Amino acid sequence: MIDTPSALLARRLAFGIPALALGGAYVAQYGFGLPPCEMCWWQRYPHFAALGLAFVSLVAAPPRLWVAFAGIAIVLSGAIGGFHAGVEYGWWEGITACTGPAGAAGGDALEAIMNAPLIRCDMAPWTILGISLAGLNFLLSTFGGLWILWLLARRKVPGL
């Protein structure tokens, strides 16, 4: 059982943050025609895990532990989003599967072009105020996940 208001808020955030992030990703993908690149998918996996861990906290003891694991998964998604945003902004090089030249794999150049990924990881398809979707995920997930962990670490001070 969740024993403090802070822990209850942490559990709600453990459900809400990944649901918001995944919902936004799927609206962008299917509503606005912005298909995900490989690193976009990498950011989704920890959110799926966080939702599952948040659900486990409803039925398994100790619930605070499962919410903490969800918070860690959310922070992990934020870290991946931060790496992806850095690739999009040109701060560092990305993985070759998303950003490499067409002939990098060797063999027939035409075959490499035909089999190359269509969605590049190093180009942000959409930004708001100069922040890409990966950057938004970095901000939301990193700070949200840390907030969850901070809420769980809080203890009620006796006499207050």
Image (cartoon, rainbow, N blue to C red):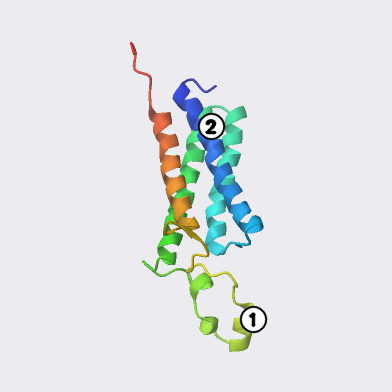
User: What is the x, y in percent for residue 102?
Assistant: 54, 82
Where is residue 85, by image quadrant? bottom left
Q: Is residue 110 visible?
A: yes
Farthest top residue? 159
Residue 104 percent across, percent down from the top left: 51, 82
- Residue at point 43%, 52% (across, down): 79
Name the secondary structure under disc 1: helix
The residue identified by callout 2 is 12
In this rendering, does residue 66 appear at all? no
Q: Nearer the viewer, residue 50 or 15?
A: 15
- Quadrant of the image for the N terminus? top right
Q: Which mark is residue 114?
A: 1
For the image, the number of numbered tags is 2
| Amino acid tagged 2 | Arg
Label 1 neighbour load within 10 Å: few <14, some 14-19, many 20+: few
Query: x, y (%) of residue 125?
Result: 53, 65
Closer to the chain start, of discs 2 and 1, is: 2
Q: Amino acid at mark 1?
A: Met
Label 2 sits on a secondary structure element that is: helix
Location of residue 38 in the rendering, given as x and y in whole percent from the top left corner: 56, 64
Q: Is residue 104 above or below residue 136?
A: below
132 or 65, nearer to the observer:
132
Q: Which mark is residue 34?
A: none
